[in-house]
Amino acid sequence: MWSVLWAVALAGAQVIEFESNGLKYQTLTKSSVTVMFANLPTHIHEYAIIQVAVSNGAAGPVVVRPEDFVFERADGVSLKATPASNVVGELINKGNRSDVIKLVSTYEMALFGMSRLHPTNGYESRRQQFLAEVSSAKLKAAAAASAIAMVQTKLAAGQSTDGAVFFSTEGKPLGPGRIVMRNSAGEYRFNAEEPEPGKKF
């Protein structure tokens, strides 16, 4: 099913929503570049997290950065994603073993939902690199965040990547609003998440 949805997404600029492994995904293609994301059901310190995957089907390269992502809240406030270096720096100062377990287990669960996508330079390759280089238990949380966090990536034609994008929300869920991504491939406006009935933003 996932591969069919991915093929449909490549066909036109229409947001497609689907569920996999308990997560709700949205995917959108513009200029032959496909972006997909899902909200992750956890937070680390002050950050809400989304899982993002990007596949470059265009003839030329495309650069993707976590700062390309913005959460437009229902009240009109825009929240820009936090650079990966800031998140890693905070985990160096405040991280512990439980952060590592929560971050890795949540992200790997989400990866299972994207099992049809095989990123050329995503989490798995970064994990092997970063965790192999860490011997200090104190830095395990930072190493996990370094492997999982989406960083600025130049995708050549046919390449893909995945990673976590962090929003500083004081540890609260993102709530009602929509994810928007803007880069050289265009503006990707995903469907808005509406507030639950009876709840105020």
Image (spheres, helix red, strand yellow):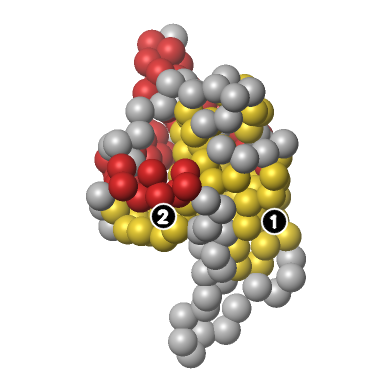
2 vs 1, front mark: 2
Viewer-nearest residue: 115 or 7: 7
Asked if residue 51 can be seen in this view, the reply is yes
Q: Residue furthest front?
A: 11
The residue to which callout 1 is attached is 79
**Residue type of the residue flagged with mark 1:** Leu
Viewer-nearest residue: 194 or 79: 194
Rendered residue at 60%/78% (across/down): 201
**Residue type of the residue flagged with mark 2:** Tyr
Is residue 1 depicted above or below 195 in this figure? Answer: above
Disc number for residue 142: none
Q: In 3D space, how far apart are the residues under numbered discs 2 and 1 (Cα atoms)?
A: 20 Å
The residue to which callout 2 is attached is 25
Q: How crowded is the residue under tag 2: few (<14 C-alpha within 10 Å), some, or many (20+)?
A: some
Task: Verify CB contact (< 8 Å) between mark 2 and mark 1.
Answer: no
Rendered residue at 63%/32% (across/down): 64
- The picture places residue 28, in percent across and down from the top left corner, at 52, 50
